[in-house]
Amino acid sequence: MAIGSLGAASFYVPFKKVKKWSWESYWIMQGVAAWLVAPLLFAWFTIPDGALFEVLEETPENTKWIVIMFGALWGIGGLTFGLSIRYLGVALGQSIALGLTAAFGTLIPPVVNTDNTLSWVLILGVSICVAGIAIIGYAGSMKNKSMSEKERKAAVAEFALKKGILIAVLAGVMSACFNFGLEAGKPIEQIARSYGANTLYLKNPTLVFILWGGFATNAIYCFWLNIRKGTYRDYFRYGGGVFINNLFFTFLAGFLWFLQFHFLGMGQSKLPEELAVFGWSILMALNISFSNIWGIILNEWKGASRQTMVVLIVGIIVLIASTFVVNINPQ
C-alpha cells in the first residue's frame, strides 16, 4: 500500500509541467487516464486469459449499479474536498474531511455488514489514524497563526467557518463511499476468482465500476466549466506540441493516482479478514504522510517555526504508527 500511496502523493507533481490549460481541462484529462484507462488496463492484465469482460458481463446488474453509484458519490466527495480547502484552508479542511473519510470508510462497512464484526483493534487503529490527521491539522493551524494578516487572507481569502465545515463533512462522508463501493463489490471478486484471478488482484474489476461512476461525476462538472468558461478550446487552440505535452503529463498524473487503489487491493488481501476493511484507514494515513513529506521537500512548510515542524513530524509518525495496529492480536 505504501507504493500506491507514494504514487498518489506524487500525482500532483506532473501537473506542474502542464502548459496553458485551465484546471478543469487538465483535471478531466488526467481523469480519463486514472478513471477509465488505468482501471481497464490493470484489470485486463491481472484477470487470466483476457477474461475481464466476461467478469464484467457476468456481474449482477444490481451489483454493477450499486458500485457505480458509490463511485459517483465518491466523485462528489472529491470535488467538494477542494471546496472545503477553499473555505477552511488546508489545515482545518483536510483534518475534517480526511478524518471523516478514514473513520466512515473504515467503520461503517462492518457495522452494516452482519458477516463482519467491529473489533476493538479496528476502532483503535481508526482512532490513532484520526488523531494523527488532527495533529497534522494542528501543525497547519500553527503555521497559519505565524503568518501575517495579509498572508493569512491570501492563503484563505474566502474563509467561511459554517459553510466550510458543512462542506468538509459532506466531502468526508462522500469520499468514504469509495470503500463502500469496494465492500459492495464482493460478488465481483467471487466471479473474478472463478476465472482464476490471483487473490492479490481480485478488487481490480470492482475498481472499473467504481471509477466509471467517479468519472461521470467529474466529467459533468468539468465539461460544464469548460462550456461556461469557454475553456473547451484548451484542447485544440494551443497547437499539437502543447496538446502532446499536456496529454503525457496528465496521463502520467492519472496513472500515479490510480496506483493507490491497485495496491490497496493487494494490501487488503494480505490483512486478516476481520481487519481487511482497515486497509482504507492505512491508505488514508499513508497518503497524508507522503503528501506532507512532499510538502516539506517542496518547501511548502518553509518559514514554519521549529515547534510547528516538530508537531508536523509527530503527526506523521502517529499516522504511520496507526498502520501497525493490524499486527495486534485481537484475542
Image (cartoon, rainbow, N blue to C red):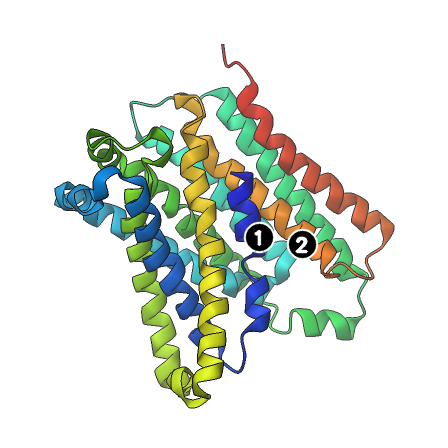
Disc 1 on helix, strand or loop?
Answer: helix
* Residue 252, percent from left and from top: 48, 62
Q: In the figure, residue 106 lies in which quadrant?
A: top left
Dot 2 amino acid type: Trp
Q: In the figure, residue 145 lies in which quadrant?
A: bottom right
Q: Residue at horizontal 43%, vertical 52%?
A: 258
* Residue 228, percent from left and from top: 37, 85
Q: Depth check: give the residue in front, 12 or 119.
A: 12
Q: Depth check: give the residue in front, 270 or 210.
A: 270
Disc 2 on helix, strand or loop?
Answer: helix
- Label 1 packing within 10 angstroms: few (<14), some (14-19), many (20+): many
Dot 1 amino acid type: Ala
* Residue 75, percent from left and from top: 37, 58
Q: Residue furthest front?
A: 49
Q: Depth check: give the residue in front, 319 or 142.
A: 319
Q: Residue furthest right?
A: 306
Q: Specify which label sits upstream in the sequence, 2 or 1.
A: 1
Lateral position of residue 96 relative to residue 74, left or right = right
The answer to whether one can see residue 118 in this image is: no
Return the residue at label 1: 9
In this rendering, the answer to whether 86 lies above or below 172 is: below
Return the residue at label 2: 294
Q: Residue at horizontal 44%, vertical 72%?
A: 247
Q: Depth check: give the residue in front, 300 or 202.
A: 202
Q: Residue at horizontal 57%, vertical 67%?
A: 86
The answer to whether one can see residue 293 in this image is: yes
The number of discs equals: 2
Q: Residue at horizontal 71%, vertical 60%?
A: 298
Badge 2 vs badge 1, beta-carbon distance below 8 Å: yes
Lateral position of residue 85 relative to residue 212, left or right = right
Could you give the CA–CA distance between mark 2 and mark 1, rounded to whole angstroms?
A: 7 Å
